Image (tube, rainbow, N blue to C red):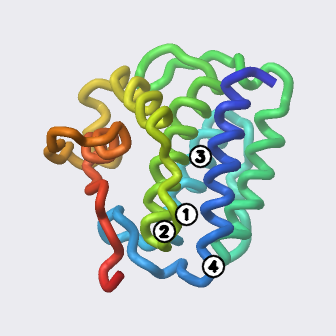
């Protein structure tokens, strides 16, 4: 197993803990405008699955359940099995941001997505923020490589103003178009 898959797996484990902590709050609104906590999990599953299907690593059948936590666990099991296949992590392809590998994409794009959307779900459901200052610096450096594509349609909203003295986590979230102090309506 390469380091990139280990990075992805660590981020997926953290996301799994957040998903497990949702309880009955799946319909709570998230910081992603118009999306509930359940919608965020479905988005994560759909985007990862789409990528792995396009590369012939999964079939198109998503997990057959309406329970987002169960769907995530089933999906993650499929992903782990696909990534455990010898040589998959090192498999090169021409990605959106240039030449890369399956492993790098899983760690640096989909793993990045797990951390950010983990924060979205945690905020929506009253859980502690899962992003550390070190995470924020690492994710910020990854986003630097994406340039203007970071704020293209369907990726991140336009950056928000960053106040003086903001923490690395606040800086990252504002850069991604998220209010670092967002709380669910009625909280």
Task: Check whether the beta carbons of the residues at disc 4 and disc 1 lie within 8 A of each other.
Answer: no
Label 1 secondary element: helix
Neighbor class of circle 3 (other Cα within 10 Å; few <14, some 14-19, many 20+) is some
| Quadrant in the picture for the N terminus | top right
Q: Identify the residue position indicated by label 2 in the image.
A: 39
Residue 9 image offset from top left, x and y in percent: 71, 39
Q: Identify the residue position indicated by label 4 in the image.
A: 23
Whole-angstrom CA distance, mark 3 to mark 1, is: 10 Å
Neighbor class of circle 4 (other Cα within 10 Å; few <14, some 14-19, many 20+) is few
Residue 171 image offset from top left, x and y in percent: 28, 40
Q: Residue at x 77, y 34 (%)?
A: 83
Q: Identify the residue position indicated by label 3 in the image.
A: 48
Neighbor class of circle 2 (other Cα within 10 Å; few <14, some 14-19, many 20+) is some
- Observer-side mark, 3 or 4, equals 4
Residue 97 image offset from top left, x and y in percent: 41, 22
Whole-angstrom CA distance, mark 2 to mark 4, is: 15 Å
Q: Identify the residue position indicated by label 1 in the image.
A: 42
Label 4 secondary element: loop
| Quadrant in the picture for the C terminus | bottom left
Instruction: Report the side of 32 relative to 124 (left or right).
Output: left
Precedes in sequence: disc 3 or disc 4: 4
């Amino acid at each position: 197993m390469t380091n990139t898959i280990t990075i992805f797996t660590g981020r997926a484990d953290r996301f799994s803990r957040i998903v497990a902590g949702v309880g009955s709050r799946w319909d709570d609104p998230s910081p992603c405008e118009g999306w509930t906590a359940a919608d965020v999990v479905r988005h994560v599953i759909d985007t990862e699955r789409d990528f792995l299907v396009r590369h012939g690593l999964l079939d198109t059948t998503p997990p057959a359940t309406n329970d987002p936590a169960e769907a995530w666990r089933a999906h993650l099991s499929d992903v782990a099995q696909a990534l455990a296949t010898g040589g998959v992590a090192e498999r090169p392809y021409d990605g959106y941001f240039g030449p890369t590998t399956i492993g790098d994409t899983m760690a640096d794009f989909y793993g990045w997505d797990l951390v950010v959307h983990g924060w979205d779900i945690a905020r929506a459901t009253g859980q502690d923020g899962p992003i550390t200052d070190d995470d924020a610096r690492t994710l910020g450096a990854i986003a630097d490589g994406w340039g203007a594509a970071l704020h293209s349609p369907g990726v991140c909203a336009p950056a928000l103003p960053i106040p003086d003295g903001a923490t690395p986590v606040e800086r990252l979230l504002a850069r991604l178009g998220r209010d670092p102090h967002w709380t669910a309506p009625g909280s």
